[in-house]
Image (cartoon, rainbow, N blue to C red):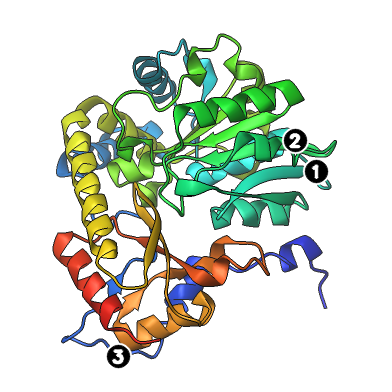
Amino acid sequence: MLPLNPDLAATFRPPVMEARRWLQGLAPDPQRPLINVSQAAPIDPPPEGLRRAIAEAALTQAEAHLYGPVLGNGELREAVAVEWNRAYGAGLTAGNVAITQGCNQAFCAAIASVARAGDEVIIPVPWYFNHKMWLDMQGIRAVPLSCGPGMVPDPQAAAALVTPRTRALVLVSPNNPSGAEYPAEVVRGFFDIARARGLALILDETYRDFDSREGAPHDLFADPEWGDTLIQLYSFSKAYRLTGHRVGALVAGAERQAEVEKVLDTLAICASQLGQIGALWGMRNLGDWLAGERAEILRRRDAMARAMAGLDGWRLKGCGAYFAWAEHPFAESSATLAPRLVREAGVLLLPGTMFMPEGDTDGPRHVRIAFANVDGGGIASLADRLAAFRG
């Protein structure tokens, strides 16, 4: 038998793919179509103008089919720097920006630049499962940090978990899976602890375009020495519906980008050329459209909160961006409840056990609902089905 990396073998299988397997063998029910709230990816294609820009590039730009710069195309890197300077009051240059093959790759590169097997990384729970999977594959211990009211983690609680092996603190805001938007003072608290302890703060802002707050969600980029501590991650996939093109970004100090370049060159050489062309076109032309997308997501967030408030026994713990994190009223673990909801209610969601350490008592009591692809009527139907379901 061929050898197998034990760290990889011990890593759990992709949760979304596992959930899709629950649908196998189930006949579609036209009277009760499936409500799929399992994944936080746009299901519609990009706007026509962006698609035309990609198609035109595919037909007329020879370089769109070739390798590009490992850290990304210069025009896109510069556009990110300009927009971040406007949005965050920053002083970035293109040298602070790397374009990655999706935001998951940005996380992998960030971790590879700060930690190795045997090290520790502190991450709030519930965690984004792909972050946990990558840490497990690399033999890096994920140290869980419990969240408090509003699903917001406490910087001082994180400080108490730091050991000589700790290399980074990880935050996702708005959060996947809880939807929580971390207050600016909380993010600053984590930054200050990371700086004082010589750690990296890896801040995943994949869903920044759907934050309900006006203005910058934090002031970290205004710190002249931010690059000594902060690594920020971003995804164009959610903003411009480019999930299949795989375009993300990693923002860091220029010296760290030299190390990130080694990782990206080894993993994929460069991000998709057509995806980068689409992302740049989106940044230049879709500002008003994206504002409309944000407004619709915030309407759905409000509809989700109202719907959950009317469900007996259910308790909404967090709700924002694409997600709701809810405590269910049943004695059954969410690990077995979720597959039953598919069969008996026509609802596909993810159990809390997919986002929590094994044995944690919170996992079985919670579910994640990714509501961004469900309109107001669909959210009302979801609530009706959950209300009618009997555990």
Q: CA distance from mark 3 to mark 1?
A: 47 Å
Q: CA distance from mark 1 to mark 2?
A: 7 Å
Residue 349 in view here = yes
Q: Amino acid at mark 2?
A: Arg
Q: Percent from the top left, x then y, of residue 26? A: 35, 89
Residue 14 in view here = no
Chain-order first, disc 3 or disc 1: 3
Label 3–label 1 contact, CB within 8 A? no
Question: Which of pointers 3 and 1 indicates the residue nearer the eye?
Answer: 1
Could you say which quadrant of the image residue 199 lies in?
Answer: top right
Chain-order first, disc 1 or disc 2: 1
Chain-order first, disc 3 or disc 2: 3
Image position of 144 (left or right of 327): right
**Residue at image x 30%, y 76%?**
386
Label 3–label 2 contact, CB within 8 A? no
Q: Nearer the viewer, residue 334 or 47?
A: 334
Residue 270 disc label? none
Q: Amino acid at mark 1?
A: Asp
* SS at circle 1: loop
Q: Percent from the top left, x then y, of residue 119? A: 80, 43
* SS at circle 2: strand
Q: Percent from the top left, x then y, of residue 37? A: 34, 66
- How many numbered marks does the figure carry? 3
* SS at circle 3: loop
Q: Nearer the viewer, residue 242 or 200?
A: 200
Which residue position is annotated with label 1? 119
Which residue position is annotated with label 3? 27
Q: Amino acid at mark 3?
A: Ala
Q: Percent from the top left, x then y, of residue 121? A: 71, 43
Which residue position is annotated with label 2? 167
**Residue at image x 81%, y 73%?**
2
Give the position of the N terminus as an image quadrant: bottom right
